[in-house]
Image: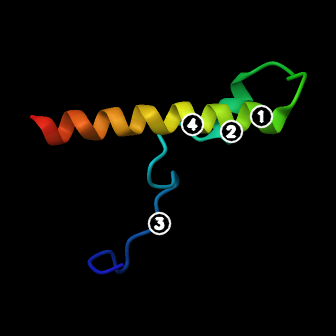
Amino acid sequence: MNGLAGRPSPKIPPGVCLPWDEKLKELPELSGDKELLRKIWQDIDAFGNTFIWQLLLSF
């Protein structure tokens, strides 16, 4: 990327507020389809990220 030479890459990927791996550490042992839970978490997290960006761009 231009302009980021020499800077470390971010720990959290773009478009993510709280990564699934971090959230998974907070949760008790999961039963059921863990892949489905991961997908739902990532979808909800993406909505939060979109909401934050919309607030920043609207005002």
Three-letter code, disc 3: Ser
Relative height, residue 34 to residue 30 (above, below): below
Residue contact between numbered discs 1 and 2, judged by CB atoms under 8 Å: yes
Check the image and tell me how it is coloured. rainbow
Q: Which mark is residue 36?
A: 1
Q: Which residue is mark 3?
A: 9
Spatial CA distance of label 1 from label 2 is 5 Å
Q: Dot 1: what SS?
A: helix
Q: CA distance from mark 1 to mark 3?
A: 28 Å
Report the quarter where the N terminus lies. bottom left
Determine the image quadrant of residue 19: top right
Q: Which mark is residue 39?
A: 2
Residue shown at 16%/42% (left/top)? 57
Three-letter code for the amino acid on which mark 2 is drawn: Lys
Measured as percent of width and height from the top left, residue 52 is found at 31, 34
Q: Residue at x 69, y 41 (%)?
A: 21
